[in-house]
Image (cartoon, rainbow, N blue to C red):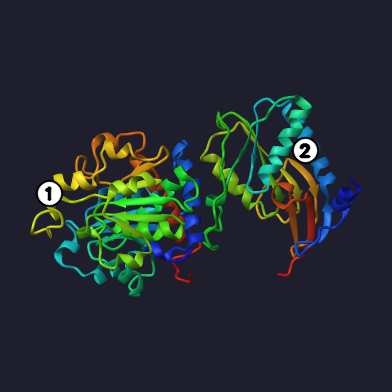
Amino acid sequence: MRRHLLSAADLDRPEAELVLQTADELRSLADRPIKKLPALRGRTVVNLFFEDSTRTRISFEAAAKRLSADVINFAAKGSSLSKGESLKDTALTLEAMGADAVVIRHWASGAPHLLANSGWVRSSVVNAGDGTHEHPTQALLDAFTLWRHLGSLDGRRIAIVGDVLHSRVARSNALLLRTLGAEVTLVAPPTLLPVGVDGWGVETSYDVDAVLPKADAVMMLRVQRERMSLEGGGFFPSAREYSRRYGLDSRRMATLQDHTVVMHPGPMIRGMEITADVADSHRSVIVEQVTNGVAVRMAVLYLLLSGNDSGGQA
Amino acid sequence: MPAEAARLREPAPGPSGGRTVLDARDISRALTRIAHEILERNKGAEDLLLLGIPSRGVPLARRIAEKIADVEGFDVPVGSLDVTMYRDDLRMRPARALLPTEIPDGGLDGKVVVLVDDVLFSGRTIRAALDAMNDVGRPKTVRLAVLVDRGHRELPIRADFVGKNLPTSLVESVKVRLEEFDDVDAVTIRESAR
């Protein structure tokens, strides 16, 4: 595998399948008395978070620790990052400390790319979400969850419903699921579909009721209430209208095929894009997504870091 | 049937060819003997558990278990133990795909575990397997069965049950092929290009 994971588009089909297969073997670790493997002993993984994201950070932290790596958490709040230090100086600091992998979450789209290609650090860079751009490990864990439920994704229909415009999850998923052979339909109000979505190789629709009965899986995206107000962009008029037209409730869930699963990357807002009875129903695999997240991130760290000695000869 | 026999007798064809040192019957006989030796040493099939090291150790373990079942009428549990994450050369080689680890219900605690692998060479795989087992449970005893021991140990490890001792030079390579993976049972040896 390559040295960095910056975009879901970095992975071709064999590489993506290798990650899923590796994650599948690693998942069984959770059932063992000693939930630890020595593969990354003596390696250092830095979680560099310029944006708060507790769930992604602890998922990466658990993954790195289960592989016996040393983990350093570097959060923006209360550190030099909030005092105006540049990404470059932060990177040089991490390099001086000998980080083997940097897991970066940044509010600016493209920050992981800059970190990986600037020459500031020799470590592997993993994009843990950048701006409205990409979140490849989320896409991998979603694909892994789908793969466990549906088997091969070839020809499977996946509906992604919600704020596609601001969603790095949607973009990474659209790219990866297509690589794995699935047919993706993005469903959103016209205001929340990005310009240029035609080039993603996916279908789009404004009508969730037309898409749901054909879907093999439905992925709901979070819609932030702030996007409603005029200052937030005025993307939709009211939460009630959004829920009515695009929210997943039990009535809409009843139109799904028997095998169809419901996913959500979290954090979800019950009552907004998804009702509580749907989130807690037997179709919902939302909790499983969290478990799978650790296994997938272990697979990514293992594949990026083994055989890639930090000496830099890779 | 004669054609079948002839096919089995013939040296393995193709680029992965080389000199055949064990054919299907030899392999079967060796595994039968190993099964008897395991039973003899253990005084029966009580508490036995066979753990194959993927990939080719796993079908070998299954075959030994079948032979034990034939003799004792007792189904010995069979599992697999992947050692990839415990290898000492992880940092030197490109990442390898992981192989399945399946521990039979009841775990390893208090069991007599027989590790099964196809070729015993440097001993490093077995060292990794002992470490891997440590994280899964605490067997009463661990023994080692291999189809071929080709020598050149780099660690103080030896096998308890050996199908065939095969003195080799370091430039030779030993290849075990099994029907489950390669459509034929054969152990071949050839000069490697290195």
Q: What subunit carries mark 1? A: A
Residue at the location (73% across, 40% down)?
B160
Quickly name the residue at label 2.
Answer: B34
Q: Is residue A170 visible?
A: yes
Along the line of sight, the residue nearer the viewer: B127 or B163: B163
Task: Name the spot of residue B105 as percent of width and height, x first.
Answer: 56, 30
Image quarter for residue A166? Answer: bottom left
Hey, what amino acid is under mark 2?
Answer: Ile
The image shows residue A279 at horizontal and vertical percentages of: 29, 38
Q: Which mark is residue A270?
A: none
- Residue A263: image location, x then y, percent: 34, 45
In terms of image quadrants, where is residue B75?
A: top right
Mark 2 residue element: helix
Residue beneath the point at 25% across and 60% down: A193
For disc 1, the marked residue is A238
Q: Which residue lies most toward the front here? A: A210
